Image: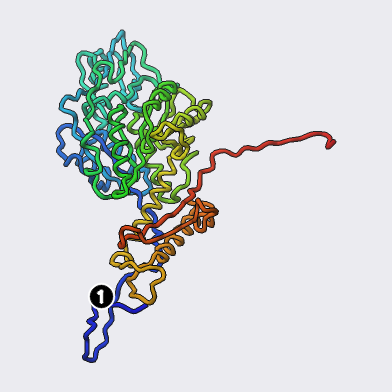
Amino acid sequence: MSITFNLVPATAAASAVYVEQENVNRGPSTSSLPHKILVPGQYNDGYSPTVNTPQLILNKADAWTRYGRGSMLAAMIEKCLKKGGGCSVYAFPIAANSAGVAATGTVVVTVDDAEAGTIYLYIGGEEVDVAITADMTATEIGEAIADAINANLDLPVTAENDAGTVTLTCRWAGESGNQIALELNRDDDDETPDGVTLEVTDIGSVTAGANDPDLTDVFTTENLGGKWFTEVPFPYTSEDAIGAMEDCGDERDDPSVMRQLVGFVGFTGTIANFITALEERNSQWSTYVPVPGSPTSAYMIAASAAAIYAKYQQINPGRPVKTIELPGVIAGNEAMKDYADTVVQAGGSWTINQDDDTVIIGDLCTTRTTEDSGAKTEDWRFTIIITNIQHKLYQIYNTFAASPFARAVVLTDSHGKGPSYGIRPKTVKGYAIKLVRAWGEAGLSTDIDTIINGNDDDNPGISAEINDSNAGRIDLLIPDIPSAGLRILATKLEWAFTTG
């Protein structure tokens, strides 16, 4: 190999000492993919962020300033910042539909000689305590309820009292507001003061939230740009909205983009309705996280799942995220464990309610259960395979987009002495082998010798060759065998009192 210089003149004749430096990768890039959480969502009225554009958010105060306290976007961002293990969090602000309708619910107060005490309301699982005194009227109690709600700027609703009828209105317009649960006396020790009767009508039942934003031309690869966004807590649950997110996932899977995403969707309906919802989905980019009957809003379940997933994938890429608590998510009223296998077979994740009302993850699964042809597939069943591939694509790109490949010329393997920037297929193969060995050490791939060397004519192992019709192109094949997360350990114990 001849030594080549980029800056030292080849025709220099005068006495001199030239020292040229160049950063050259002697081995493949094995740096970990930095996880970035992208949070799409709506903001409060009166705010004017740059919509449909990712924005790095540094802290919750930054989110409050940009999107308003209590907004869907600010609440989800705060969860991701707090529980995402230091992963970068980006907002993707979305404007409300011009035809959007905000969800409303009511608390109607009636009084018959009220006694002093505390009213316990729960909004999206968040406790709101309202102290009342003896002999307060329905109007006065209604005013106290409205004041207590409005004093908590992080609640997703505002309240207005009219003679003891308190109307709670979602801070943003759209169907997503119907996710917000309104409850009375959730805990066993809660008790409404004597002489006071409260009639609670769910948010979305007085006025149904309607017309979420149309995301067809909004949540797109063009708008997301060239950054890696690894996890997306998706706040919308309508079929069209989730479809737009899945379409974006398909776009970002294109070889020219290579920026795959893991999309999380919360679900709080019944198990039966969950299985029905899964029938409408078939995409590796959507991972439903169900907590049937939970008062935690679906959009906050999605944020919790994305945050905890990103945190653990940043530490150990490709390691399953299971038996781990969903932070801040309150247990529901249906246990999923007995239905876990049915749900997983249908393309759904499952969770476990704990005695202390916390929730832990059972399995995280994508909704992809069949190929385009209709044939069943197991390849995309568990969400972790996406992160496994994300990590490898990131390392492959960073390896071959840098020196010595960036400004190389293609030489055949049989070429004799050549310049330092001459790249042969065997050079590419050598870097690929080192990559695969690193994946094996990280537990991302298994059976490394078979990946590298193959085992028959149908699997020749890692191979690289100059393309027959394009002399400037080297084609590389890595027949990877991703490692699978341990899901089942089956044991059979046979015993007998005799051996005969």
Q: Quadrant of the N terminus?
A: bottom left
Answer above or below: position of 1 versus 273. Answer: below
Report crowding for label 1: few under 14, some 14 to 19, many 20 or more residues within 10 A (C-alpha).
Answer: few
Vertical arrangement, residue 401 with respect to residue 65, above or below: below
Residue 476 drawn at (x, y percent): 40, 57
Give the position of the C terminus as an image quadrant.
top right
Please indicate, yes or no, whether residue 126 appears anywhere in the rendered image: no
Which residue is rendered at x = 26% and y = 83% of the image? 18
- Which residue sits at x=24%, y=38%? 219
Task: Give the structural element (helix, strand or loop) at label 1.
Answer: loop
What is the x, y in percent for residue 247?
Answer: 29, 37
Q: Quadrant of residue 398?
A: bottom left
Left or right, 205 with reference to 429:
left
229, 165: nearer the viewer:
229
| Residue 394 in view | yes
Q: Is residue 277 above or below residue 84?
A: above
Q: Quadrant of residue 63?
A: top left
The residue at which mark 1 appears reads as 6
Residue situated in front as seen by the camera: 267 or 397: 397
Residue furthest to the front in view is: 469
Residue sitting nearer the eye, 74 or 214: 214
Amino acid at dot 1: Asn
Seen at 27% across and 38% down, the residue is: 40
The image's colouring method is: rainbow
Residue 10 in picture, x, y percent from top left: 24, 82
> In the shown orientation, is residue 241 left or right of residue 310?
left
280 or 85, which is in the foreground? 280
What residue occupies the far bottom of the structure in this picture? 15
